[in-house]
Amino acid sequence: MNAAPAVRIPSCAMVVPMLLVLAAAAPLHGQVCAGFAPLDETRYRVAVSAASYAYATAMRASVTVGGTPYASLGIGRTRDAELDAVSVDAGLEAGLDLTAQNGTFYLCPVAAFTASFGPDDFLFRPDDYTYTEGAAGFGLAVVPLRAGRVTVLAGAGARLAHLTVRRVHRSTEVIRWKYTNTYTLWSVGAGVVLDDVLTFRTFVTMPSRFPPPSTLEGMAVPFGREEGEVSFGAAVGLNFGRRVRPPR
Amino acid sequence: MSSEPDDLRKAGRAGSIAPRLLLPCLFPCLGTATCSDLSGPGAGGYVTPELRHLSFHYLETSYPDGGVLSIDGAPADTSFRLRQGQRVPVEIEVSSGDREEVGFYRELCPIQERVPVYDCFSSAVAVHADVHVAYLASHVAAIGGRFTMVFPRGVGGVVAVFDPEDLVRKARRAASWPGVRLVELKSSACPGIALQCRSETRSRLRLPVPVDTGVAVPGDGIVQIRPGDTVTVTYRQPGGGRLEAKRVVP
């Protein structure tokens, strides 16, 4: 049997699965610049987050290790209830929390890679979807308030993401469709840190230049990746593994 | 026991009000955030757009007993889009005494405009050659549905569910029923990416309602009819007018 030729123009059936993974790619953001407590006093952080997109919700968890340079490993699950479509993802992010003015301002260059799997059997079609995305960008953050045990962080960022989507026939494993795209994801986050340990943060993301007009012009893309569509999320992070400081 | 806080403070961990006060809130808070869906039932309720068309027809297969009254409506404004959780109220009145107040939903799903459309209430089931689709009647009833069509020789049929929420999930469940060979979402009038057609038809409303023969039980969600009854479906327009459709039960 001959392999089916790859289709160059994505059909509408691709859009929902594609956006499932795009939604999944959002949560692994910079640390201070996204509203988390810096890893100054502790070595590790675990965080869980939830995000609400126009048609989907996402849950994910991450573990962050490091200090000024840090790395985060995260896993997530995004679901569109109406379409009963689910994707799971795993992502690795590395970045720097560069600070000036004694911890008041931060610059956070960041790079991330995410692989997502699903949805499978989308709307009863015999195809499975996989996605990979590489992204690089930066964030800016400020600490406007330190009062006792409470610290308030606010930040914003942008990253350029390159996405590759593959639709694979379940039985033949032939790649029936492959699509690549580059877009920008803007984010704004704010967090409240208690005791430099526990962070509550909220974030807003908004894509732009997605999808590119030349290929998916006019398509209203769900899952928070429609051009200009704002998505909301919240997260909680817990720092632990206190660093041992040499006595002065 | 009283020395514990001091010990902890000496260890450099005690002033930590955060874990003690806020950790219990962590997962409930996240759960709330996850479960809330901007387009979900929370944004629902009844809405009353101006309708230009109202009709209904009766579908019966006798698998299982009873049939389905399929009510269709068309808003005057073709850009109207019913949101998930929203309903458009209609009244069903039978001359023998039954009276039901029900709510239209969309004819076409999903809400996303750019995804291929499917009938919000129906899916098609095909069974293996040695199985008659009537064998699935109890399974169909268990998901809150009825057959609206049975294919020749019982090789398959169309199942309508009365609650459109989670249609895709219910269809997936049907795929695991014994004897089922294939399940498909039922395509509607605008297949593929015929955007113009879709734009016009995405405003349409539909509601299947179960119908039984027997004594009227008003308000039970099932329309009871008898031969010779007149069935009237009424919609109250937002401006005060009424739109009606009538049929006599043969």
Image: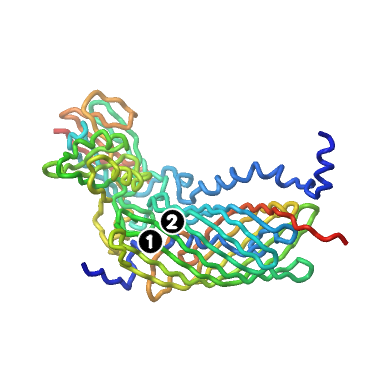
Q: Nearer the viewer, residue A145 or A115?
A: A115
User: Which residue is depicted at the point 46% across and 59% down?
Assistant: A223
**Both labels 2 and 1 in a single chain:** yes
In the image, is residue A211 above or below residue B206?
below
User: Which residue is depicted at the point 28% across and 36% down?
Assistant: B139
Q: Classify the position of the C terminus of chain A by image quarter.
A: bottom right
Check the residue under mark 2 and report the chain it is in. A
Q: Classify the position of the N terminus of chain A by image quarter.
A: bottom left
| Residue that label 1 marks | A129
Left or right position of A224 against B104: right
Q: Amino acid at mark 2?
A: Ser
User: Which residue is depicted at the point 47% across and 73% down?
Assistant: A182
For this orientation, the residue located farthest to the bottom is: A214
In the image, is residue A37 above or below residue B180?
below
| Residue that label 2 marks | A87
Residue B177: where, in percent of width, then height? 27, 40
Mark before the other along the chain sequence, 2 or 1: 2
Q: Can see residue A80?
A: yes
Disc 2 element: strand
Left or right position of B58 against A45: left
Rendering quarter of residue B99: top left
Left or right position of A199 against B190: right
Residue A78: where, in percent of width, then height? 47, 54
Circle 1 packing at 10 Å, graded few (<14), some (14-19), many (20+), is many
Which circle marks residue A69 in the picture? none
Q: Are marks 2 and 1 in contact (CB under 8 Å)?
A: yes
